[in-house]
Every structure is written in C-alpha cells, then in structure tokens.
Amino acid sequence: MTIIRKAAVQAGELIDDLLEFSRLGRQGVSFRSVMMTDLVREAADEVRMVPEGRRIDLVVGELPPCRGDHRLLKLVWINLLTNAFKYTKNRNEARVEVGWMPDDASAEGITYFVKDDGIGFDMKYVHKLFGVFQRLHRKEDFDGTGVGLAIVQRIVQRHGGRVWAEGKVNGGGHILFLPRKSHGMMNVMEILLIEDNPEDVEITLRAFQKYQLANKIHVVRDGEEALECLFGTGRI
Amino acid sequence: MILLDLKLPKVDGIEILQRCKSDPRTKRIPVVVLTSAREERDLADSYNFGINSYVVKPVNFLKFTESVRQIGLYWILLNQLPLEIHPERQMS
C-alpha cells in the first residue's frame, strides 16, 4: 500500500508542477518593484524540507531590488532553493549561498545566483538542465519531478532575461539568472545633482553607477546654474 | 529628482528650494537635501518649503557611498512618481 500511495503522491506533485508550468504561459504578469532580499527569505521559509541530521547554512546577501512580478519571482526562488537544499543531501553540513553580481554586458543588468556545495552535475549535460522532465540524476537518489528548472527558465524569460548554470560533479551547482526586462527595467529617472564640492560629486556619481542605478544625472555646481537648468532654456 | 546641497555659492540652496516648490512646473519633483551640516535652522527652513527628505552627508567615504545607494534605491525603485511630473497646463 505504501508503494502505491507514494506513487500517487508523486503523480500528484507532477501534475501540480505541470499545471503550474502551463499556467505560466497564460497568466498575466504585473511588474512592480520587488525587494529581492525579502523575497528570498519568504521563499526560504516556504521551502519546507526536513533534513534528517543535516544542517543547511543558508547565506543570503544584500540583494538589489528589481522590477518584476512578485509572485513569479518568488516561485523562481522557491524552485532554486528547493534544488539547492535537495542536491546537497550528500553532505551533513551544506552551504547554500544566494547573492548577486553586476552584469558585465549591460549597465542595467543584475545577475542573481544560488550557489550550493552539493552533488553538482556534469557540464557536459548542462543543456539538458532546463528542459521539462530532464533530470541529470536518478529518481531513486533525488526526488523531484524534473520541472522545477523549466519553470524557472520560463519565468525568467517572461521577464526578458535568461538563466544559466555552472557546475562540477561533486563540486556543487551554481544557477544564475538575469531578470532583465528589455524596456524600462529599472525606473529611468532624471536626476539633478546640485553640488559644488567636486569630490562629493564624484562619490555620488560613482555610487549611482556602482549599484546599477542607471539614470540620467545632470550636475550643476552652483545655484545660478541650477536655476538656469530648471527654469531657463535647459528644462529638466 | 533633485539632490540638493544647501551650501552653494552664488545662490543659496534654500532659495533654489523655494523657487522649485513654488513653481507649478517643478513643484512635484522630489527634492532630497544632501548636505554636510545638520543645522536646525536649515532643517526647519527646508521642511517649511516642502523638501521630501533631508540627508546629512557622512564624512566617511564608504558610508557616503552607502547613503547614496540607499537614497537611489528608495527614490528610483521603491517610491512612485506621478506620470506627469511637469504639469504644463493649469487645470481650469
């Protein structure tokens, strides 16, 4: 009886995941500002996995917010974290790290990632990773429906972005995604910086640049210039 | 958005602020004062004229960068602005 019940549960999970997957294509998305760090924490709370005798060290960095669909992005994190927790089963003490890095290619992109030190995978099969039902590990060894990463990819693509993976056999996995929407990803805002101290101007401009707050920044050094900029010929 | 240092040569920061907030073309633009001093007088005047925020520049370079980051993240990503920032016409 136990075997049949287990199969039924698994089939149920599979159907749920498939429904979720197909639903993604049809549902509307609503884009707004998303506080990613909070979202990751919410997702982590929802990933209810009871590791027997295991300890998972989840490190969540200070993630920049992005513009996207709150519900869908949460699903991304739930799937990525579920995978990370699952594929570190081989270790008693596992480390899962969630972080971000600026995108080399574009000024506006931010790449988020989930890194684990678990069983990893062979890069030879990386192209299979995001396919529906594609599994790189045996079902007996690792539970799951094989749809999780396909869902992640579908969602990230709806945000106009891309997801990719890096891994090593027994060397952990690293899933990265760049949820960039092609138009108006970040709020484009024109900023007038009225500052006479050149060092402060420099620091301020660098800070905007460093944190991917891509915007048009006009700098004026004194009150007269400021008024001219605002009310004169060059209107903000 | 306007990032305004109060200590400016030629025309004082408070005067800029007053001009901005009294002109219908510019009064919706959020003004964040980013200045070196925290003088009660400046704070009172600034808020009287309707600034949106007052931030004192940290002396430490790293903390300054962090402040700018937080200001940017808040005003650019979290805060909502009306679509028409510069109302051109008077509503009759």
Image (tube, coloured by chain):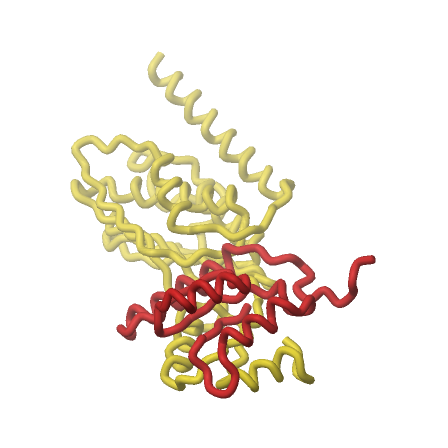
Chain colours: A yellow, B red
Residue B80 versus residue A220: which sits nearer the camera?
A220
Horizontal and vertical percent position of residue A50: 26, 30
Residue A43 sits above or below residue A201 on the image = above
Image quadrant for the C terminus of chain A? bottom right
Relative side of A201 to A71, left or right? left
Q: Is residue A154 depicted above or below B74 in this figure?
A: above
Indicate the position of residue A221 as horizontal and vertical percent values: 49, 85
Q: Nearer the viewer, residue B61 or B12?
A: B12
Q: Residue placed at 24% from the left, 40% from the top?
A: A89
Residue A103 horizontal side relative to residue A217, left or right? left
Q: Which quadrant, please, contains the N terminus of chain A?
A: top left
Is residue A150 visible from the viewing direction of this image?
Answer: no
Q: Position of residue A6 (x, y in %)?
A: 37, 21
Q: Outermost residue toward the right?
A: B92
The residue that appears at 53% across and 48% down in the rendered structure is: A155
Instruction: Decide which of A93, A137 is in the foreground and name it.
Output: A93
Residue, x 28% and y 74% (percent of image)?
B59
In this picture, residue A233 sits left or right of residue A57: right
Residue A213: % across, % down = 47, 68
Tally of numbered discs: 0
Question: What residue is drawn where x is 57% and y is 67%?
Answer: A188
As drawn, the residue found furthest toward the front would be: B41
- The reply to whether residue A26 is visible in this rendering is yes
State the image quarter where residue A127 is shown: bottom left
